[in-house]
Image (cartoon, grey):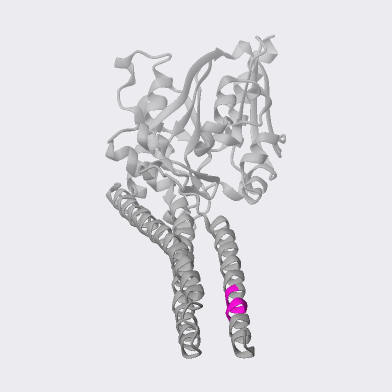
Amino acid sequence: MTNNEYQTMAMSHHMLREFQEQCKQQEAAAIAAEVENTLDYQQFEDEVLAYPIFSNHACRNHDAKELLAAGSEEAYCERWRFFYAPDPWKLPQIEYQQQMEAHLDKLRQRMLNLTSPRLILFAVAFVAIILLVMRGHFLLPALPIAALSWYWYRSELKITETQRDLHEHLDKLHALEKQQQGMAHQLDSLPPPAGLEQLHQQYQQAVEHLFRGTLLHLLNPPELGDLSQTLPQQHWEGFITESWGHLQLPLPNQKHTDLTRKLLDEAHIPLIAMLDDPYGRKGHSLYRLQYLHVWILTQNGLLMGRGYFDRVANQFLYEQHEFYPYTQLSHLELTEQPLPELAILKQRLPENLYQRYFQQPVSVLSVGTSSGKTYECAALPISERPFRQTLWKERYGLDTDMQRLNRCLHRRLYPVARSA
C-alpha cells in the first residue's frame, strides 16, 4: 500500500469515526431534549362558571356554583354579578396556552436541528466521495455512503416522529383556542350586573317583610292597615338596627350555633362579599349578608324580629320573631367595645377589612331574659355608620338611634323593676 493510499484510508476512517461520534452526540442530545421538552397535555372543563375566576375584595376567588345552581333565573345572575366580577385572566387555560406556545417553539426548533445537519453531512460526504474517486479508490466511497444512509434513515425516523408531535400539538392548541372562544362567549352571554336602584328596592322590600312579620307575631292581619300608621295607632315605639351579618358572629350568644357554623363554613365564603359605596358616601357600603333587627316597644313587652338577609339570593337565610313581657327581661346593657376575636373569621377576611370592622369599637346592645337567653346586636363601627337615617322613620316610624332605644327600654323596665 502506497503512502497516498494509506493517507486516504486513514482520512476515511477518521471521517467515519468523527461522523459516528457526531451522530451519537446528536442522538443523546435529542433524547435529552425530548425528555425535557415533553409537555403533559391537560383537559379542562368547558363550563367557565366552574373556575375560581369570580372575585370580591372581601373574599378570595371562587367559582360560580351558586350561579349554576340558580339555573336560568336572570335576576339572580344579575345580583350575583353585582358582587362578583369575573376575571378571565385567572383561567388556568391562559397559563397553559403560554406553555403550549413555548412548547410549539421547541418543537419547531427540534425540527430545524434535525433537518439542518443532513444538508451539511450530505455536502461533507459528497466532497469525501469526490476526493476518494479522484484518488482512484472506487470501493472506499462506500463507507461515507453507508454512514450517510444510516444517519439519513435514523434522522428520518426522528423527523417523522417530530412532525407527528408537531401536528398533534397544533391540533391541541387549536382545540384550546376554540375552547377559550367558547368560554368568552359564555361570559359575554351572562346577564349584566344589577344596578344599585334594583338592589335598594329589593332591600326595602326585605325590611318591609321583616317589619310586617314582626307585627303579625302579635297583631291580626286586619289590624295592620297602613304600615306607616301601625305603630302610632297602637301607641308603640319602633326601632331598627342594620348591620353586617358577619359582624354578629363574634358575639358570645352566637357561638356554637348552627347559623354561625354555616356562615363560617368553607362552602359559604362567598357570603362574606361586600362592596363600598360607589359614590364614596359614608355608611353606604353594601353587604351581601345584611343583619336586620326590629325592636318594637309595646305597652306590655318587647317585640323583636331579626333576620339575616342575603342580597344575592334576595331572601332571608334566617328569620325569627319573639315577644317578651317586660317582666321577663332581666338584663339590658349598651356598650361600646371591640368585638371578641374570632380566629376563623380573622383567617377568612383580608387583614385590612378585619381591622376596619372587627378591631374598631362597635355598639353592642344586649338584652337578657329571665330564662337565661340573651339577645345581642352589634352595630357597625362609627366610621362605617351612615349619617342620620330617616328612610325607615318616614316609612314605618322606625328609629335607628341605638342610644334612644336603650333609654326607651330602660324607661319601660324601670317601673317593672320598682314593682318587683
Q: In this view, does 224 lie to the left or right of 299?
A: left
Location of residue 388 in the rendering, given as x and y in whole percent from the top left corner: 51, 46
Task: From the viewer's side, name the closer residue of 187 and 32.
Answer: 32
Q: Which residue lies furthest to the front in this view?
A: 1
Q: In this view, does 142 lie to the left or right of 352?
A: left
Task: Report the residue at 34% width, 55% height from top.
Answer: 171
Task: Report the residue at 53% width, 58% height from top.
Answer: 34
Q: Does the magenta stretch include residue 61?
A: no
Task: From the viewer's side, name the closer residue of 227 and 266.
Answer: 266
Task: From the viewer's side, name the closer residue of 314 and 26.
Answer: 26
Location of residue 117 in the rendering, given as x and y in whole percent from the top left corner: 49, 75
Query: Does any portion of residue 109 appear in the rendered image?
Result: no
Could you tell me which quadrant the N terminus lies in? bottom right
Give the magenta part as a residue range: 12-16
What predominant SS class does the magenta segment belong to?
helix
Task: Report the residue at 37% width, 27% height from top.
Answer: 209
Location of residue 284 in the rendering, given as x and y in whole percent from the top left corner: 48, 49
The tally of labels here is 0
Q: Is residue 56 left or right of residue 176?
A: right
Query: Does any portion of residue 126 appear in the rendered image?
Result: yes
Could you tell me which quadrant the C terminus lies in? top right
State whether residue 28 is above or below residue 275: below
State whether residue 117 is above or below residue 382: below
Task: From the viewer's side, name the closer residue of 319 and 39.
Answer: 39
Task: Report the residue at 64% width, 16% height from top.
Answer: 415
Location of residue 397 in the rendering, given as x and y in whole percent from the top left corner: 42, 33
